[in-house]
Image (cartoon, rainbow, N blue to C red):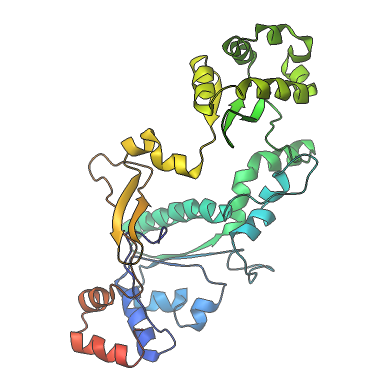
Amino acid sequence: ALFNDSKSGITLNLKHPEGLDAARRLVAWADVLIENFVPGVMARNGLGYEAAREVNPSIVYLSTCNMGQTGPKARQRGFGSQLTSQSGFTYLTGEADGEPMLLFGPYVDFVAVGFGLIAVLAALDDRRRTRRGQHIDLSQYEAGLQFIAPALLDHETNGRVMTRLGNRSRDAAPHGAFPCRGEDRWCVIAVRAEDEWQAFCRATGHAEWAEDPRFASLAARKAHEDELDALIGAWTSRFPPEEAMETLQAAGVRAGVVNRLSDLFADPQLIHRRTWRELPHPVLGRFHYEAPPFILSETPAEPGRSPLLGEHNARVYGEILGLSDREIERLVAEGVIE
């Protein structure tokens, strides 16, 4: 329901000859085709790039899968969590003395989609000038590598292997999530420059920390980070996270509340920008959909609800393919449209 908003929903049996014919007619009508099957699946179903190009030479055809269309691992199946691990994220995530930890959700899926969008727009721009389509071969594995580029560069140039640090940072101290007043309430704090450290000490009412030799420089603070974190945690635990954040931000220190999921729906900033759009759904009832995180000044987005399976069969097959009601009824009866 969440990821299919504003789409049309149809059903089609590609194993039936007339189903494949209908799919090809949709390809002939389309500007872009996107698929994420293991290499070879679309071709075996008669909808590979070459078959698509036969009916629509200008089609932009995006294939996005785990490893890309070629190579010794091309046929590897999996989901975003596996790719997150293979791309190196999991190795870098977790406590310094602990095991690798998975990120929340299929992170590489969300990374890859951005590169897919860029590639499709580039191909459409080329088609605008040349009238030719093309096949885009997107490896989600390789897309994930783009987001650990600093660690890869450090290894390549300096021979260093970046290790897990938990919530800490190599170039900041304090840096982490600190407990606040209330049940499971936290505030994140990051101090990099020395002037920020001085401002932090003043804002917390602990000017003596700035004079403490243990914390006199970033190197010193890193060497005594356990002691520093304990002192800061004792300070933050006196306040709700919102108050701690506001106090520190007012002093020019980077700080933020760790929002719970319920907090996000009540956030005045998100409410102001109409991030959540409540729409009726025939199965779910009233449901909050997330609007795009950008606002176009002339054409603002108004998301629609997610469709039911086959909800738009009549419109797609009737209006786009030009089938009559009787033809659609026959295809339903014969199991072409399910």
Q: Classify the position of the N terminus by image quarter.
A: bottom left
Q: Is 142 displayed left or right of 312 in the figure?
A: right
Number of dots carrying numbers: 0
Q: Residue 161: where, in percent of width, then height?
A: 78, 41
Q: Is residue 255 above or below residue 216?
A: below
Splitting the image into 4 quarters, where does residue 40 fall?
bottom right
Query: Which residue appears at 76% of the width and 40% of the height?
Result: 163
Q: Nearer the viewer, residue 69 or 255?
A: 255
Splitting the image into 4 quarters, where does residue 123 fall?
bottom left
Q: Is residue 6 above or below residue 239?
A: below
Query: Which residue appears at 40% of the width and 36% of the height?
Result: 267
Is residue 137 something one can see in this rendering?
Answer: yes
Q: Classify the position of the C terminus by image quarter.
A: bottom left
Q: Residue 104: where, in percent of width, then height?
A: 59, 50
Q: Nearer the viewer, residue 70 or 317?
A: 317
Splitting the image into 4 quarters, where does residue 121 fall?
bottom left
Q: Residue 133: where, in percent of width, then height?
A: 39, 65
Query: Which residue appears at 34% of the width and 62% of the height?
Result: 306
Q: Residue 126: where, in percent of width, then height?
A: 38, 56
Q: Nearer the viewer, residue 221 or 182?
A: 182
Q: Is 318 displayed left or right of 268 in the figure?
A: left
